[in-house]
Image: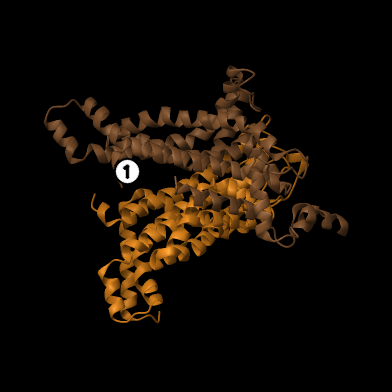
Chain colours: A orange, B brown
Amino acid sequence: MSSTHSQSAGWGQKVIGVARWLRRDLRACLSLGFLLFLVGVAVFATVIAPHSPTAQNVNNMLLPPSGAHWLGTDDLGRDVLSRLIHGAPATLYASFLAVSIACLIGIPVGLIAGFVGGWLDDAISRVVDTLLSFPAIVLAIGVTGALGIGLTNGMISVGIVFAPQLARLVRAQTLIVKQELYVDAARCFGASTARIIIQHIVPNAIQPVIVQVTLLLAASLLAEASLSFLGLGVQPPQPSWGAMLARAYNYLEIAPEQMYAPGFAILLTALSFNALGESLRVALDPTMKHR
Amino acid sequence: MLQIAPVVVLATFVVFGLMHLVPGDPAVTLAGDYATAQRIEEIRHAYGFDRPLLVQYWSWLSGALQFDLGKSLQSSELVSSMIAHRFPNTLIVVVMALLLSMAIGVPFGILAATRSGGRLDAAITSISSLGVALPNFWLALILVATLSLGMGLFPATGSVSVSKSWFEAMHHATLPAIALAAGGIAEVTRQLRSALVEVLSSQFVRTLHAKGLSPLAILWKHGLKNVSVNLLTVLGLLVNRMLGATVVIEAVFAIPGMGSLVVHGAVAKDFPVVQGVVLTMVILVVVTNLLVDLLYTMLDPRVGRE
């Protein structure tokens, strides 16, 4: 409200730009819509869910879908739809936690390596190469084992493991941007290093990072599902899609339909993050516009 | 060759450091909940936690260099022999999955690229985006429920050593390999398609068309030869990713492999086992990357000259 005229005009243009992009790109529109829907479900989980996600009922075990339980019940008689709804906040929390940690570590490290250069860049690049040689999920399992089992520790581990990917990307971008004329110009005008990085490097290097972050959200989601499936993430009775699949696995022979709902939830969410990332890549890349 | 030396050294630091990520006193954690002060002291001494960190690292590393990765805290088995027993079970699944990714991904990538913009291209591209987002352990569950429990075509769990029976070993590894390969097929298809589209739309290919070379000859002699380097890069990445993904797949199929070993180790805080498996896997990846780099120089003479 109190923003100056120029700022509000800038925001207005941005909103119009995003709206135009969404109208042109059906894929981006659909995936963004689904993700916003998911955020809504996560925020209002307690209101929407028809039943308690943890209320057990031994008389209602492994029921098929019905009017009372739209997606049936699980092995402890709990409503599958309610558990699915209550799994959404855990899943989103996990993905955003892991990616935030990856950004907090990866972006500054990449900026420093790219901007400072020299032996520091060499050292950081070697460490990044090393960490990228580890199969991500295996290293995350090792770190989780050390930090202690649980969703938060698991996702901190995933964030640490994903950080080098961002560091490498940010470094490469910084190396390109720092040779631009406007950076030299800023330095001539006496801008401090911090100001050059924040005002000039970051805004111009950030676009591929935004794309990568969106793709990492999908990867984190799949990592959370994997860790929870292995029993290293969400602990019972808290619901999570991966943990629901782990329970369904135990009853595969008598109730194989148990695995479809959480699996589709994971697939659709990962697909949406990936699709949004791909659409952003096309939208943000000036060389790919007007194709 | 010189490039990988620092990576290997740093990797051993990371693997060694895993145990020291444990919050608080590692000896107390390792001793368990009801340990006496004496037992904690014993463990501290046995692991050398009372010695300087670099001394500890050196003794661990010199052991590791002689394939001595310590003993499991749980079973007191030698970690190296546990890994040697389980590694073949993981290897057969990963190798089959890699072969499947190539055998299916390459033809689909070529099909999509040569019909770029068409309906078949759109279908292949959509399916491969689905394959990238598909949780592979969910696919594994579906395969078990339908093909093995439903129709009885494949065994649902376990693995058989190649030395016992080739056929049985392959039969047991087929479903895990398919589940593992889904992401790989999608990745190979996508990467090959985008690389091949770029080559086929380049100037020199247009010249070849103009001088009357048949499309098939262009594809074989010029298209695929130029994208073989991209294919190699994907293959290297897939080895890394599949060694990770196999952890969850092994859990679904109850395969006694490296993945189940590291998961049990992490749950039980059996650090020598976790360190041993992580070290083995990272060395495998580093060696693969080295092989990929060497093959680059063979495929692309420009690389070696730089």
At a point 47% along the width and 60% down the height, the residue shown is A124
Q: Amino acid at mark 1?
A: Val
Residue depicted at 36% across the width and 68% down the height: A201
Chain letter for the residue marked with disc 1 in the picture: B
Q: Is residue A212 left or right of residue B151?
A: left
Q: Nearer the viewer, residue B88 or A158?
A: B88
Query: Residue at point 77% right, 40% down?
Result: A59
Left or right of residue A64: residue B234: left
Q: Relative to the observer, which residue lies in front, B264 or B76?
A: B76
Q: How many marks?
A: 1
Furthest-left residue in view? B211
User: Toward the viewer: B40 or A40?
Assistant: B40
**Percent coordinates x, y for residue A235 in the rendering:** 69, 51
**Residue B50 horizontal/vertical position (percent):** 76, 60
Q: Position of residue A117 (x, y in %)?
A: 39, 65
Q: Is residue B177 left or right of residue B76?
A: left
Residue A209 at x, y percent in the picture = 41, 59
Rendered view: B109 above or below A209: above
Residue nearer the viewer, B240 or A117: A117
Residue A71 shows in this picture: yes
Q: Is residue B289 above or below residue A212?
A: above
Secondary structure state at the residue bearing disc 1? helix
- Image quarter where the N terminus of chain B lies is top left
Q: Locate residue A289: give its quadrant.
A: bottom left
Q: Which residue is mark 1?
A: B303
Regarding residue B126, the answer to whether it shows in the image is no
- Label 1 crowding class (10 Å Cα cut-off): few <14, some 14-19, many 20+? few
